[in-house]
């Protein structure tokens, strides 16, 4: 069946469902769910119950003790994570979060209201872990854990992108993303996963990056970029790999050196770091900053993240610089230090160019490249010609994790205002902490759930449409590898004519490099605007 057209998808019914949600099994309609993880990926990661199955099958081939396994896992996690127990107990059903989820706004499905999404799990919690639930059952909002309930969990917890927008509006600070993380972790215990999450995780475990690129392939990619940058700018940069004794380890999401438009951001990093003379190296093993463990389990986060500190130690660097990515930074900022640290063998990062000491990275020893670049601009260390970006009329999409997990709201805007001359914000309520998700984060950026991705991305696209029509915006800048992959099809669907770029692509365009040839093109090889060229 062909994908629905935008004018069909925009007809959204928000009326209450005809039956109580507890009596309505999940409807696995094509285009709205993700395929199961392949057995080979579970096997590779040592996860339980590898087998061939699909969500639309009647029999999910669960282990005989699946229910006991999940309830035991739930008990352990309720004891281990105070936040989990708190989030199960304290919701007052005020409804402040109800209309804040992009999946609810785009689908009208009540179980995509964050309060009800969480209720899918709370109802089971009440049944097995509270006295009222044990005694009064459904009257107390409790229900048994059945195969239908598990299927409902799978359907709706893989229709949550863990974006945390709802938590911004909850008066109690309940973080539905953490409930989703817990649900996915519990499902992992019985082999219920999606392939778009586990395949990158398995690749990462094997070769260090999501794409399964081996060290020689990584070197080829970097060498190719160095050659191409020389063709574009006339400047030959040095991008070393596995060089012991470098001052800084640079870790980027693998999409930066393999995906488009990410690749132009990668060229921007190479140009900038060469221009300021940073003594850095890549690692062919820590060749991925992204971490799909975040969408699987806490244990998987830790396993996939460990390589970064290990490589920093092996190479003897002083500190770590990280590229543009969303969930990568949530892991680095919120989990890395406690899971795989303390990184006492590293130093508190100091920019060798400006002398700025990044106190905010005192614990992790890892600096975001937007912090690094904003500091360079602030201290007047690079020469920029923003007119080279005059062919772009830019708006900025705050990626969920940098905005809500890092609070990185000003640095990208500061950079953009210095490297472009046409910049317009999307409306209040759709940016900064309240930014809308791309609709395909947390491992949902696959093709089989295209309809749900377009639905989930509708609020974001709608705000882009507004600035396109009002100001003529033709470029959406962002700082997340998943966004750079998922926003182009989203915008092509809802707002054709708006392209997507990373912040450092625009930096690379504007950067005036010593020894450069006359710049006729941007990093995409497209002619730069006439006025700038003259
Ligand atoms: S975390 Fe995001 S996707 Fe999940 S329920 Fe909240 S708003 Fe929706
Ligand atoms: S805003 Fe918070 S307390 Fe209110 S319904 Fe949503 S999760 Fe519950």
Image: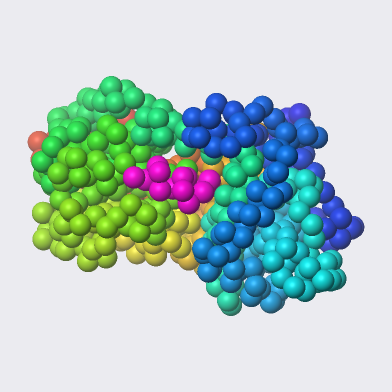
Q: Position of residue 21 (x, y in %)?
A: 82, 58
Location of residue 492 by image quarter: top right
Q: Residue at x 53, y 46 (%)?
A: 296
Depth check: give the residue in front, 482 or 178: 178
Q: Tell me the quadrant of the picture where the C terminus can be found.
A: top left
Q: Which region shows up in magenta?
A: 293-306
Q: Position of residue 289 (x, y in %)?
A: 35, 43
Q: Position of residue 235 (x, y in %)?
A: 15, 32
Q: Position of residue 124 (x, y in %)?
A: 73, 60
Left or right side of 256 for 141 = right
Q: Name the magenta segment's main secondary structure.
A: helix
In the image, residue 303 lies in the stretch drawn in magenta: yes
Location of residue 211 by image quarter: top left
Depth check: give the residue in front, 520 or 118: 118
Q: Do we see residue 2 in this rendering?
A: yes
Q: Tell me the quadrant of the picture where the N terminus can be found.
A: top right
Q: Residue at x 71, y 49 (%)?
A: 67
Q: Residue at x 24, y 41 (%)?
A: 311
In the image, residue 87 lies in the stretch drawn in magenta: no
Left or right side of 207 for 520 = left
Depth check: give the residue in front, 276 or 207: 207
Above or below, 453 relative to 111: above
């Amino acid at each position: 069946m062909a994908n629905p057209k935008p004018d069909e998808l925009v007809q959204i019914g928000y009326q209450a469902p005809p039956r109580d949600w507890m009596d309505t099994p999940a409807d696995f309609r094509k285009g709205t769910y993700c395929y199961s993880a392949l057995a080979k990926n579970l096997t590779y990661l040592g996860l339980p119950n590898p087998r061939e199955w699909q969500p639309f099958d009647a029999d999910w081939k669960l282990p005989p003790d699946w229910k006991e396994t999940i309830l035991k896992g739930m008990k352990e996690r309720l004891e281990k994570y105070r936040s989990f127990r708190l989030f199960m107990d304290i919701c007052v059903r005020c409804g402040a979060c109800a209309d804040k989820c992009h999946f609810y706004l785009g689908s009208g499905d009540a179980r995509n209201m964050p309060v009800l999404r969480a209720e899918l799990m709370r109802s089971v919690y009440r049944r097995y872990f509270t006295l009222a639930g044990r005694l009064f059952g459904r009257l107390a909002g409790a229900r048994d854990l059945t195969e239908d309930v598990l299927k409902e969990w799978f359907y709706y917890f893989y229709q949550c992108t863990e974006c945390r927008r709802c938590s911004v509006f909850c008066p109690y600070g309940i973080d539905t993303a953490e409930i989703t993380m817990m649900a996915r972790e519990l499902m992992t215990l019985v082999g219920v996963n999606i392939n778009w999450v586990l395949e990158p995780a398995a690749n990462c475990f094997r070769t260090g990056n999501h794409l399964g690129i081996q060290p020689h392939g990584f070197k080829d990619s970097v060498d190719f970029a160095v050659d191409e940058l020389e063709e574009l700018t006339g400047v030959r940069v040095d991008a070393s790999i596995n060089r012991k004794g470098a001052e800084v380890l640079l870790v980027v999401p693998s999409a930066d050196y393999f995906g488009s438009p990410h690749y132009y951001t990668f060229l921007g990093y190479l140009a900038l770091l060469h221009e300021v003379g940073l003594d850095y190296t890549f690692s062919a093993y820590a060749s991925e900053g992204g971490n799909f463990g975040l969408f699987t389990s806490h244990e998987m986060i830790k396993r996939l993240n460990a390589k970064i500190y290990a490589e920093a130690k092996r190479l003897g660097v002083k500190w770590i610089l990280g590229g543009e990515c969303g969930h990568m930074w949530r892991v680095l900022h919120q989990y890395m230090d406690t899971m795989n640290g303390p990184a006492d063998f590293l130093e508190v990062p100091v920019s060798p160019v400006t002398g700025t000491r990044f106190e905010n990275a005192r614990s992790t020893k890892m600096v975001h490249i937007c912090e690094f670049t904003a500091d360079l601009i602030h201290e007047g260390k690079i020469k920029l010609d923003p007119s080279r970006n005059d062919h772009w009329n830019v708006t900025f999409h705050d990626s969920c994790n940098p905005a809500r997990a890092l609070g990185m709201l000003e640095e990208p805007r500061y950079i953009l205002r210095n490297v472009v001359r046409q910049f317009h914000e999307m409306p209040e309520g759709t940016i900064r902490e309240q930014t809308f998700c791309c609709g395909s984060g947390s491992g949902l950026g696959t093709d089989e759930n295209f309809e749900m991705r377009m639905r989930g991305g509708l609020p974001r696209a709608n705000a882009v449409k507004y600035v396109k029509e009002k100001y003529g915006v033709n470029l959406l800048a962002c700082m997340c590898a998943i966004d750079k992959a998922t926003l182009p099809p989203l915008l092509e669907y809802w707002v054709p004519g708006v392209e997507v770029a990373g912040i450092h692509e625009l930096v690379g365009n504007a950067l005036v490099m010593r020894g450069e040839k006359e710049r006729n093109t941007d990093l995409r090889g497209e002619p730069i605007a006439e006025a700038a060229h003259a």
